[in-house]
């Protein structure tokens, strides 16, 4: 059985690990958001070049 101090240290260690996981997830979300924004810009650039190339034919 763990002593109270050991139990508290173990709990602290688990909370630190959970915090690290959350930070990693947030960084991943930010990276995905950056990639989405880059794709949006590429789409806008492609549409601008397509629209500027001449009249649209359907």
Image (cartoon, rainbow, N blue to C red):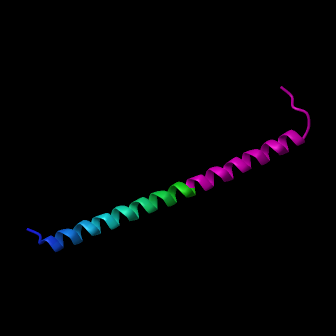
28 sits left or right of 20 in the view? right
Residue interval drawn in magenta: 32-58
Q: Residue at x 50, y 57 (%)?
A: 28
Q: Residue furthest right?
A: 54
Q: Residue furthest left?
A: 1
In this view, 29 is above or below 51: below
1 or 8: nearer the viewer: 8
Is 52 included in the stretch rendered in magenta? yes
Q: List x then y, in percent, for residue 10.
A: 22, 69
Q: Residue furthest top?
A: 58
Q: List x then y, in percent, for residue 50.
A: 83, 41
Is 57 included in the stretch rendered in magenta? yes
Q: Residue at x 51, y 60 (%)?
A: 27
Which quarter of the figure has residue 31? bottom right
Q: List x then y, in percent, for residue 35.
A: 62, 54
46 sits left or right of 29 in the view? right
Q: List x then y, in percent, for residue 1.
A: 8, 68
The kind of secondary structure the magenta stretch mainly shows is helix
32 sits left or right of 2 in the view? right
In this view, 45 is above or below 31: above
Q: Residue at x 24, y 66 (%)?
A: 11
In this view, 58 is above or below 9: above
Considering the image in quadrants, where does the C terminus appear? top right
Q: Residue at x 39, y 65 (%)?
A: 20
The number of numbered discs placed on residues in the rendered structure image is 0
């Amino acid at each position: 059985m763990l002593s109270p101090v050991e139990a508290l240290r173990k709990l602290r260690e688990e909370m630190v690990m959970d915090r690290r996981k959350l930070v990693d997830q947030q960084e991943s979300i930010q990276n995905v958001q950056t990639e989405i924004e880059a794709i949006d810009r590429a789409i806008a650039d492609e549409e601008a070049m397509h629209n500027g190339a001449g009249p649209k034919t359907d």
